[in-house]
Every structure is written in C-alpha cells, then in structure tokens.
Image: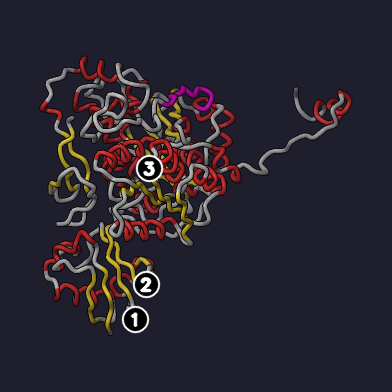
Amino acid sequence: MAVSHLQCKECKAEYPLEALYVCERCFGPLEVAYDHSRTSRDVGEWRRRIQGGPQNIWRYADFLPLAGGPPGPSGRLASRVGLPAGCTPLIRADRLAAHLGLREVWVKNDAANPTHSFKDRVVSVAVTRARELGFQTIACASTGNLANSVAAHGAALGIDSYVFIPADLEEQKVLATGVYGTRLVGVRGSYDDVNRLCTELCAERDWAFVNINLRPYYAEGSKTLAFEIAEQLGWELPDRCVVPVASGSLFTKIAAGFAEWTELGLIENPARPQPRMNGAQAEGCAPVAKAFADGHEVCRPVKPDTIAKSLAIGNPADGPYALELARRSGGSVDAVSDEEIREGIKLLAQTTGIFTETAGGVTTAVLAKLAARGDIDPDERVVLVITGEGLKTLDAVRGTFEVATIEPTLEAFEAGVAQTVAV
Amino acid sequence: MSVIVKIPTQLRAAAGGEAEAQVEGATVREVLDGLFSLHEELRGRIADEDGSLRRFVNVYVAGEDIRFLDGLATPVADGAELTILPAVAGG
C-alpha cells in the first residue's frame, strides 16, 4: 500500500502509522502521508483497479491508510467486512437548478449510506485501521450521525463500542444508536464538552476513539466522497462544491481528494482549476463563517444554539484549514438562519425528492444564498453534498404542512379535499 | 494560590513524565509561567514566541475554555484545576 507515515500539518514532523493524532513538538494535527512514487501505475491501471473493485469505498483502497489492503474475505487482517459504505448516488438536479437560476447542479446523496450519513465512510476507515492496530474497543464523541455509525460498525464487526453524545440530542439519533447495543453515554453539556471529556478519556483508556486518536485515519475516509464525485462525473471535477462545515474535516478532505487525484493524473483536463469550495454553517454555530467574514485566520469558539445539531461544533478542530481552503479556492464560508435551514430542507425535498436532515438544509440554503447573491456563474457545474437523512431530524419539518383528514367516502373527499387542492 | 495543572499525554515527555503539576499563580498566564519554570521545554511546545498560546492548544479552567472567559488573564482560584488539551480532536 502507498500509505507511508503520519506527518504534522504544521511543522511537518514525521511519526509512525500508529494511534497518534497530535504533534508532540508543536501540538499541530497529524495527517496521513502517502508515497505513490513506489508504484509505476499509469492512469489506465489506476482506473481499472478502481472500476474492478467492490461497490463501496474499498474500491479506493489504493488511496486509503490501510496497511493490509481492503478488508474482506481476501483481506489479510480482517475476516469480516463490516458495513459497506459509499457508492452513493450522484443525482442531476435540474429542477433545483432551474429554481435557483443555475444550469447544472448535482446532489451527492450521502444519506444513502448504511446508517444514513457520510459518517459511515470515515468510520469504516477508522475502525478497519483500529483493527489493524489491534484495538478491541471503539469509541467516539458525536453530534449524532457518528454515534449511529460507530454503534452499527461495532455491531457488524462484533467489537465493543462506547458512544458519547450531548444528552439533549434529537431523539431519532439517540434511538438509532442505542438499537445497535452500544454503550451509550449522554453527557450533560454541548458537543464541545463531550469532545473535551473524550479527549481526556482517550489518555486513560486503551480504546480507539475514531475521531480522536484515530482521527488522521478517520479523516481520510472523507476523501472517498471526492473520489466518487469525480468517478461519477466521468473522471472530471465539478467547478464548485457546497459542503457543510462542523469541524471542517469533511470540507478540507473533499478538496484534498480532488487534489490528490489531479496530481496522480486520474482527472481529465488537469490544467483546469480545482473546484471552488463553499462551506455551509448555521448562524447559531458559525465560528468558521464568522472568521471568514471578519478576515481572521483562526476561529473564535462559540456556544452553539441551532436546530442543525449535527453541525453544532463551537470549537472546530480544522477551522483554520477550512478558512484557508475557502480563500485559496475562491469559495467562501456562509451561514444561514434556522428558518432558512427549514426552507432549505423543503426546497431540496420538493425539487429533488431527497429528504435531508438539518445539516442538508444548511447546505441547500447556502447554495440558494450563493445563487441569489450572484456568486455562481450559470454555466458552472455545482455539486451539493448532502450528508444525512431527514428521518433523523423530524422536528425540523413538524408542523410545516397540513394533513387533510376525512371520512372514507367520495363525498367527504369531494367536500374536504378536492375543493381546496388542485387534483 | 496553588493550582493543579493537568498535562496531556503528548506533553508528558517534555514534563519529566508527569501527568500533573502543582503550580502557583492567580491567572492562567501566571500558572502557565509557573509550569514553564518547572518544565522549560513545555514553553516552546504550546506557546508562540510572543507568549500567546499556539492555535491548536485548548486551555480549560474548571472545565471552561478560557476563550469564553478572559483568555490568559482569566483568574484562577486557589485549588482550581487547569487542563491543557490538544484542539485537534472531534468532528
């Protein structure tokens, strides 16, 4: 495999491929480094390896941080595959585009993952690496979607899991976690409190916290979203991506995935500019959008207060990198109100048939905002990244429409419905 | 004014292997200066040349992020706990 070592994003110090996430020299984050120069594959061979792979993220195993190759019956270390993540639909959304005055909008629907969010991608990679490293227990600090995914992966692989969530999380996300038989811990406090507790706990337990000590591997899973988008577009890149921002990891890793494939020659027209990256936040938790608007290089933490709980990270770990990417790519980081989030959910549902959770409402509303502001050239090819499922945040749509209740007779239908609704 | 400073695993090698240190100080800045005088190597790891904290360092007093309080000028009560943690977790 091409995976080489861990490297500090700040001071470039190198570390072995272990459960490490912080540079001891400068406290910067560690990320995975690869060395593709040891293979002499040409573009055709790279593409054949991908297209001959399974219909899940392991088709991209050449670009993921596993020492033993993809898990599965033929894998060296793992006898059980776990949950197959990825290969979600990329849908051309002409009605949404027309509504916004744009020509070409695609929706990457990552709600179509096994636990209905993009988190299955990152957890698949982190848990597989955790097993390679010999961990017996997986854990996470979660705003909800990660909780679902870690609990489900633990169940699928038959390994113990601990899931820490804010105690006031949406009921749907709590139920869709507990059902897998995990050890579920509700912490009285915000996600940032949960994250602090888990960072302390990580030093006390020999567990693989997927988004703490396994974070360098976990984050790499998000690159598979970029790989899929490029493969589904016929080895081309979009002109622009609109992506939700919580910690900023997904946002930056999608761009990293595009850049990695461009460098390796897998992308047609490599001289074209990399996609503009637009980050989406909720006004009630917008530390990155605020720093972007203020021209700052670091984010001042906030106390979240928004219906978009899956994005409610007030102290985003990758905030500085998300800011740098938005500026470098010619994009932005914007924020929308809770009301705009509800409108965004409705807009996506009623123009594409895709029901997304509040995070997707944030992303759709930011796309609408960019279009209304004239930031998007009508000829651009835009990809909207929808990260999660509407059934997990039902409160956001409760009371937004009426149900006509009638007796089971034709007369009642004619009197109660047909007169008020165009049938 | 005696304060307990909890040292994260990643910094313990630079702190003689200690997980905690007992330091005098009435503000976060004084406590950190006290910590650095015990373990000089820690200074360069978490602070910039101008004395401010590096951007991936979180400091908490009694569980609260000092950026919600008064930053390095945040007062620290006698017997309080000051926790240093990496800011690169989560999400």
According to the picture, the residue beneath numbered tag 2 turns out to be: B62
A191 displayed left or right of A340: left
Residue under the image location 22 percent in, 24 percent down:
A271
How many numbered marks have been drawn onto this rendered protein structure? 3
Magenta segment range? A88-96
According to the picture, the residue beneath numbered tag 3 turns out to be: A159
Mark number, residue B77: 1
Do discs 2 and 1 share a chain? yes
Where in the figure is residue A182, as x and y percent of width and height?
45, 47
Image quarter in which the N terminus of chain A is found: top left
Where in the figure is residue A33, as x and y percent of width and height?
18, 38
The answer to whether residue A341 of the structure is visible from this angle is no
| Amino acid found under the numbered disc labelled 2 | Ala
Where in the figure is residue A251, as x and y percent of width and height?
34, 40
Q: Secondary structure at mark 1?
A: loop
Chain of the residue under label 2: B
Image quarter in which the C terminus of chain A is found: top right
Q: CA distance from mark 3 to mark 2?
A: 34 Å
| Amino acid found under the numbered disc labelled 1 | Ala
Q: Are marks 3 and 1 in contact (CB under 8 Å)?
A: no
| Nearest to the observer: residue A196 or residue A334 | A196
Q: Are marks 2 and 1 in contact (CB under 8 Å)?
A: yes
| Amino acid found under the numbered disc labelled 3 | Ile
The answer to whether residue A230 of the structure is visible from this angle is yes
Do discs 3 and 2 share a chain? no
Q: Quadrant of residue A393?
A: top right
Say if A37 sits above or below B67 in the image.
Answer: above
Q: Secondary structure at mark 3?
A: loop
Where in the figure is residue A97, as x and y percent of width and height?
49, 26
The outermost residue toward the bottom is B1
Disc number lying in front (3 or 1): 3
| Nearest to the observer: residue A79 or residue A249 | A79
